[in-house]
Image (cartoon, rainbow, N blue to C red):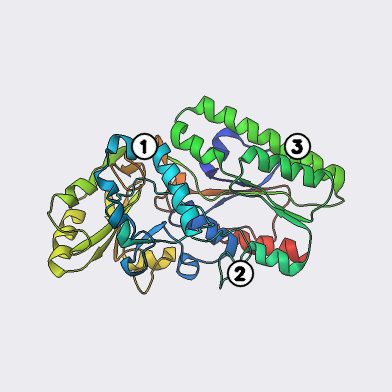
């Protein structure tokens, strides 16, 4: 069972499933967001191998968004076209138009800058071949030839829970991967409301009990593992980096390109002078730090072609880039900070001890492989 954003700090604070799942470990998150963590979990590989970090990366030659140069959407009223609902509808239209099967959202990416970028999750990463040429979880299961169920991430989590419980109740599967994402959105808005978080977790705890009871009644032997991808860090402040860079008067797409994610800013430079001026601004940021080459290597994001940025500025825990390309407002909680931050740690909870406790979220893949192979 995957619960998005169920961090180790939250698990411990609320004693989540401490009776039902006594084998418990903190797990180092994969640097980045769920867009990075999920491909890592589903393949056991780092971003340099699966080529997923943040969704958008500079690639004007192969950008699927060149049509935006003609649509002139940047001249439409922002009070309407910057609303999440409107952008979500546009995202669905674009997804269908281009045949994307993976998760796709425009977020707050400026329309006039979209033609400079490509998008990394065009394919459904949960489906067979979704991370080709790498092998993913679905590929493993098909190769093993055992009955399985992987939840459809497009469906509401209530549907996925009911579907998995029904499959366990009739004993029709040997392996199940239950996907739930509702906690992540909830914590983005209410991470600091301890009472509301406790009530939300109580609902998940009941579903865990229901699944355990169903497994006990229909299987002679089973392992139940609950995994997460990262935690959630409460808002501590904001950083208006985008405005400061825009004020330099440099031309986007000619002098430089940038993506302003919620907790990090990624830059590409096309002239020495642009690099110098932007780096001066970045060096003066008090609530963020540039990633070193050693950190990029440690996090598995040292792409030889600088696919996701030549320089990456990472905010200190709790600081959000506002306005940014992911959101125009600050949220109560965010993830995507340093993997070493206590609130960033993910969780592994189980009814039995693993042969090798996971240290990093990519280690879940090896554990799943072992269960699938019967070892």
The Cα atoms of the two marked residues, 1 and 3, are separated by: 39 Å
Side of 102 where 368 appears, left or right: right
- Residue at 61%, 35% (x, y): give it: 15
Q: As drawn, which residue projects farthest toward the top?
A: 195
234 or 1: which is nearer to us?
1
Secondary structure beneath dot 2 equals loop
Q: Which quadrant of the figure has residue 70?
A: bottom left
Q: Could you tell which of marks 1 and 3 lies nearer the N-terminus?
A: 1
Relative to 201, is 171 above or below? below
Secondary structure beneath dot 1 equals loop
Could you say where residue 277 lies in the image, as x and y percent from the top left? Answer: 13, 60
Could you say where residue 299 lies in the image, as x and y percent from the top left? Answer: 43, 63
The dot on residue 210 is 3
Front: mark 3 or 2: 2
Q: Mark 1 = which residue?
A: 83
Secondary structure beneath dot 3 equals helix
Front: mark 1 or 2: 1
Q: State how many labels appear.
A: 3
Q: Which quadrant of the figure has residue 79?
A: top left
The Cα atoms of the two marked residues, 1 and 2, are separated by: 38 Å
- Residue at 67%, 43% (x, y): give it: 160
Front: mark 1 or 3: 1
Q: Could you tell which of marks 3 and 2 lies nearer the N-terminus?
A: 2
The dot on residue 135 is 2
- Residue at 42%, 56% (x, y): give it: 55
Side of 267 where 119 appears, left or right: right
85 or 374: which is nearer to us?
85
Relative to 269, is 201 above or below? above
The Cα atoms of the two marked residues, 3 and 2, are separated by: 32 Å
């Amino acid at each position: 069972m995957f619960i998005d954003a169920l961090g180790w700090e939250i698990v411990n604070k609320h004693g989540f499933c401490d009776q039902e799942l006594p084998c418990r470990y903190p797990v180092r998150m994969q640097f980045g967001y769920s867009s990075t963590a999920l491909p890592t979990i589903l393949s056991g590989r780092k971003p340099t191998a699966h080529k997923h970090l943040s969704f958008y990366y500079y690639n004007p030659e192969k950008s699927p968004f060149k049509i935006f140069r003609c649509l002139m959407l940047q001249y439409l009223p922002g009070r309407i076209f910057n609303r999440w609902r409107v952008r979500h509808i546009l995202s669905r239209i674009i997804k269908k138009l281009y045949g994307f099967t993976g998760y796709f959202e425009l977020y707050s990416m400026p329309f006039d800058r979209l033609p400079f970028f490509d998008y990394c999750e065009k394919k459904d990463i949960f489906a067979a071949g979704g991370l080709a040429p790498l092998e993913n979880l679905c590929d493993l299961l098909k190769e093993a030839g055992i009955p399985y169920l992987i939840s459809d991430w497009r469906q509401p989590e209530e549907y996925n829970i009911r579907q998995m419980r029904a499959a366990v109740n009739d004993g029709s599967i040997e392996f199940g991967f239950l996907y739930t994402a509702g906690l992540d959105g909830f914590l983005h808005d209410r991470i600091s409301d301890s009472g509301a978080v406790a009530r939300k977790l109580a609902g998940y705890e009941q579903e865990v009990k229901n699944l355990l009871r169903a497994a006990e009644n229909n299987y002679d032997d089973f392992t139940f593992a609950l995994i997460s991808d990262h935690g959630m860090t409460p808002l501590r402040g904001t950083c208006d980096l985008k405005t400061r860079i825009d004020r330099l008067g440099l031309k986007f797409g000619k002098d430089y390109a940038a993506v302003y994610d919620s907790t990090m800013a990624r830059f590409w430079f096309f002239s020495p002078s642009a690099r110098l001026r932007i780096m001066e601004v970045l060096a003066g940021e008090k609530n963020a730090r540039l990633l070193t080459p050693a950190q990029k290597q440690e996090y598995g994001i040292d792409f030889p072609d600088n696919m996701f940025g030549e320089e990456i500025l990472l905010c200190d825990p709790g600081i959000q880039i506002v306005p940014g390309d992911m959101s125009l407002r600050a949220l109560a909680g965010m993830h995507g900070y340093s993997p070493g931050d206590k609130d960033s740690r993910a969780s592994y909870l189980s009814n039995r001890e693993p042969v090798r406790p996971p240290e990093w979220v990519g280690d879940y893949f090896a554990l799943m492989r072992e269960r699938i192979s019967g070892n």
